[in-house]
Amino acid sequence: MSDHFTTHRPLVMGTHWMVTADHPLAAQAGAGVLDAGGNAVDAAVAANLVMTTVRPHMCGLGGDLFMLIYTAASQELAVLNASGRAPAQATREAYRQMGYAEVPDTGIHAVTVPGAIAGWQAALEKHGTLGLDTLVARALPYARDGFPVYSELIQFIQERRDDLQASVAAGEIYLPGGRMPRVGQRLVQPRLAESYLALMEDGPDAFYRGRLGEALVALSEAEGGFFNEADLAGHTVDWQAPITTAYRGFTIATAPPSSQGIALLMQANMLAHSDLTAMTVDSAELVHLMVEVKKLAFAERDARVCDPAFHPVPVDAMLAQAGAADQLARIDPDRAAENCMPRDFTRGGEDTVYLTVVDPEGNAVVLIQSLYEAFGSCLMVPATGMMLHNRARGFTLEAGHPNVLAPGKRPYHTLHPAMILRDEKPDILLGSPGADGQTQTNIQLAVDLIDFGADAQQANEAPRWRSNPDGSLMIENRFPAHTIAGLKARGHDVRVMAPYATIMGSSQVIMIDRENGVLQAGADPRRQAYAIGR
């Protein structure tokens, strides 16, 4: 018998509310808000704010945000796109004149306007019951008094050590005294605590029209960047209708472009034309099919997904069922394709946080927030303790490409929230950090849950694969040896990974059993995700 769905953590169940998050302290914060009578949006923002402190390499005040919010009273589902735009002076020509062939990995030229703070406020104003000041207060003690450092954080500090020390303020916080922190040592962030106090007093204006933003502009000027006060004051969020597709009697919903969520739907559309249950869940046949489907979807994604305010994205054509059937027919069941590899203009970005919440009224939230890569741009605004993301790397500098850098433009964005609905109500909330891996993890979760009947924890712990832009295929060694051999025989450049490899994401799932009035949740042991319910 296959042990594909063997688990080491229990399935978490509750009858009132459920929260999952990428750190136990964040899940606890969300649970505390729910227990005190807050709703799902309140709890999601609280959990995210705690993660900006305790997962500083993954997310922060200087990052971007997407949310998918279901409001039970109105039975409406909405997407909040709180991603930022390029500064008004940031042009392709300016980058070329500075000698860049592509957007740099780190530094001020990798930064777009951070959108997360405005996103939290917008979500609370429209759907919350608590103020941003109340929820920021839950994160404040972890910045002011510190939190215990854990091994994963140490790993990323070590990987980015030189870049963090180059930004003196960041080096002082994450490498105090020039030394690596130890597991269990408290990491204290006093300037970040002061920024929280400013947000509690003045709200988002503290950043977009106040001293926190002024500090960013001053840093930008010192570093030769393009930011000015108008770039921050002009930031706006967008409320959007989700894009959807049908799959096995369910509806999969996600964010429209500039998010990459459409790639998840394209994969689902192609797989819907195959009887996956005729294959074994851990077989080379199934993995090969799903990897080849991913390649085709990502080739379309990379050619077309961008900020639709600047270039039209043919969403309807990309999601057409006839086109999905034609794409599926291109797949050779016995050979890995070499001519549909996606162009690697995203080049990384593993560092994101994900969480999801269901409250007693049936409101449901999926939230995903990020600095993009580890510690983002590795640039800290000295007076604020705020790490800035490097989302400008989502742009290309290729002239004529739909996703080319332009002033006031949003970059192609890997962040995408997802829900699976049945009868127009949330049935499964799912997601994961992981840049290019996000849609790949989400489609594996969906197939395990819908096609193969896994429960929420089984789907999160199931062995996983990830296909990369360079054509390699990472696959955890918990897949059977004959599956790995079968993939190699089909021509895949297989790279066998350790069990529960962190590169494979930090997925979380909440399933809503309306018949029994039960919420079921699972969280990925690959990182620090946890679920709490009542």
Image (spheres, helix red, strand yellow):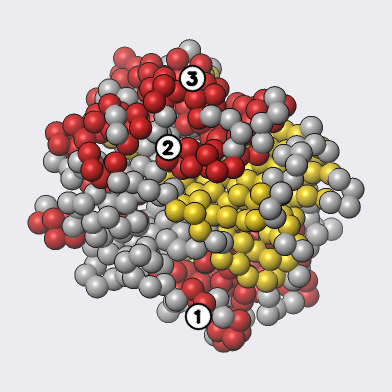
Residue at image location 18% in from the left, 57% down from the top: 91
Left or right: where 152 falls relative to 218: right
Left or right: where 48 falls relative to 237: right
In percent of width and height, residue 483 lies at 67, 65
Relative to 371, say whether 164 is above or below. above
- Name the residue nearer the viewer: 128 or 256: 128
Please state which amino acid type lies under the numbered disc 2.
Ile
Q: Which residue is mark 1?
A: 317
Q: Alpha carbon of mark 3 to alpha carbon of mark 1: how far? A: 47 Å
Helix, strand or loop at mark 2: helix
Q: Which quarter of the image is occupied by the C terminus?
A: top right
- Name the residue nearer the viewer: 470 or 366: 366
In percent of width and height, residue 130 lies at 58, 30
Q: Which residue is mark 2?
A: 117
Q: Earlier in the sequence, mark 3 or mark 1?
A: 3
In percent of width and height, residue 282 lies at 71, 63
Q: Which numbered circle lies on residue 291?
A: none
Badge 1: residue crowd in 10 Å (few <14, some 14–19, many ≥20): few
Helix, strand or loop at mark 1: helix
Residue at image location 47% in from the left, 27% down from the top: 53
Instruction: Mark yes or no: residue 145 visible.
Output: yes
Which is in the foreground here, disc 2 or disc 1? 2
- Name the residue nearer the viewer: 111 or 348: 111
Q: Alpha carbon of mark 3 to alpha carbon of mark 2: how far? A: 15 Å
Q: Alpha carbon of mark 2 to alpha carbon of mark 1: how far? A: 34 Å
Q: Which quarter of the image is occupied by the N terminus?
A: bottom right
Please state which amino acid type lies under the numbered disc 1.
Ala
Helix, strand or loop at mark 3: helix
Residue at image location 55% in from the left, 76% down from the top: 319
Left or right: where 218 falls relative to 437: left
Please state which amino acid type lies under the numbered disc 3.
Leu
Q: Which residue is mark 3?
A: 140
